[in-house]
Image (cartoon, helix red, strand yellow):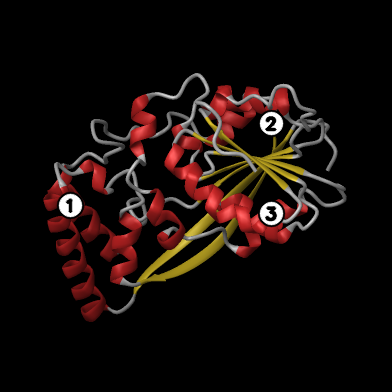
């Protein structure tokens, strides 16, 4: 297992800063992959003797963490992220799970990924991107995957939205509180507003070599505690500590959020999120199933 490699071309300072204050909170507060989604991913590797995973935008390694447990024969993981702190956290999570398997951590943008030089690299059988594809140069990422992946590989694009986008009475009030503190536009880092993708992921895939697409939807009901929501907000691009002028302002926001969420839970019952985890499994037309 390696330390993160030197930065690949294409990592901008604002990308590194976007989640600079969040890595330590991810493993504790971010929901992992639901079981049905893990089984879908594991199924793409059925019959392969020593499969290889390439996880793009790996964060703290939730996808490799799930698949190392679900696919004992998984031989090697390539984990890519633009944030060094995330990769350090990923190493601490994944290291104890490896056994005799290998892990390479790559600090760089997803579309700039290249296999290790000077070694006998193995083409990935599964390329995954969980809750991060919207941050990427999507056409360039899919073109890169076509260059590096095995002939019968699968690309999996997946995610489940966020508490910002979820439609419920309590999430609406939470979103309004965030806007009172940080402005009406959804934030995406200290200096930027979030811009939604112009076209759908299905359109991105249809215009790529990965145009054979199957969609899977997994209902995921979640019940949050007020403290859990506040911890989750520390991991987001729209309410993490780095967006506030200083720690005092962030502390005030967290107190206000905890007060609001506690009152809502007492008055209206549990804080329930009826999430839906969506998985797009894409292959090259004519590829083996």
Image position of 243 (left or right of 25):
left
Residue at the (56%, 22%) spot, across then down: 112
Image position of 256 (left or right of 29):
left
Residue at the (79%, 44%) spot, across then down: 51
Of residues 79 and 226, the one nearer the viewer is 79
Q: Count neighbours of disc 1 (C-alpha within 10 A) and say few if under 14, some if 14 to 19, many if 20 or more.
A: some
Residue topped by disc 1: 250
Q: Count neighbours of disc 2 (C-alpha within 10 A) and say few if under 14, some if 14 to 19, many if 20 or more.
A: some
Q: How many marks?
A: 3
User: Cα distance, mark 1 to mark 2?
Assistant: 44 Å
Residue 162: x %, y % from top left: 39, 52
Mark number displayed over residue 211: 2
User: Cα distance, mark 1 to mark 3?
Assistant: 37 Å
**Residue 167 visible in rendering:** no
Circle 3: element type: loop
Residue 173: x %, y % from top left: 21, 60
**Residue 256 visible in rendering:** yes
Figure quadrant of the C terminus = top right
Q: Count neighbours of disc 3 (C-alpha within 10 A) and say few if under 14, some if 14 to 19, many if 20 or more.
A: many
Mark 1 or 2: the one toward you: 1
Mark number displayed over residue 98: 3
> Which of the marked residues, 3 or 2, is nearer the chain's N terminus?
3
Residue 273: x %, y % from top left: 40, 65
Mark 3 or 2: the one toward you: 3
């Amino acid at each position: 297992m390696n330390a993160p490699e030197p930065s690949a071309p294409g990592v901008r300072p604002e990308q590194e800063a976007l989640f600079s204050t969040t890595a330590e909170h991810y493993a504790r507060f971010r929901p992992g992959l639901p079981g049905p989604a893990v089984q879908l991913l594991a199924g793409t590797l059925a019959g392969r003797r020593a499969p290889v995973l390439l996880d793009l935008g790996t964060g703290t390694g939730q996808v490799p963490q799930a698949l190392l447990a679900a696919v004992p024969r998984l031989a090697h993981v390539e984990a890519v992220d633009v944030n060094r702190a995330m990769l350090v956290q990923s190493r601490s999570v994944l290291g104890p799970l490896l056994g005799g398997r290998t892990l390479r951590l790559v600090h760089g943008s997803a579309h700039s990924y290249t296999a290790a030089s000077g070694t006998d690299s193995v083409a990935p059988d599964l390329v995954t991107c969980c809750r991060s594809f919207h941050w990427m140069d999507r056409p360039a990422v899919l073109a890169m995957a076509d260059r590096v992946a095995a002939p019968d590989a699968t690309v999996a694009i997946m995610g489940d939205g966020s508490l910002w986008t979820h439609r419920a009475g309590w999430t609406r009030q939470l979103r309004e509180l965030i806007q009172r503190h940080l402005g009406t536009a959804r934030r995406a880092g200290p200096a930027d507003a979030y811009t939604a993708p112009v076209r759908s992921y299905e359109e991105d895939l249809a215009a790529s070599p990965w145009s054979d697409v199957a969609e899977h939807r997994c209902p995921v009901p979640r019940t949050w505690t007020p403290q859990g929501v506040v911890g989750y907000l520390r991991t987001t691009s729209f309410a993490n500590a780095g967006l506030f002028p200083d720690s005092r302002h962030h502390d005030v926001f967290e107190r206000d959020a905890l007060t609001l969420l506690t009152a809502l839970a007492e008055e209206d019952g549990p804080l329930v999120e009826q999430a839906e985890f969506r998985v797009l499994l894409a292959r090259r037309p004519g590829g083996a199933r």
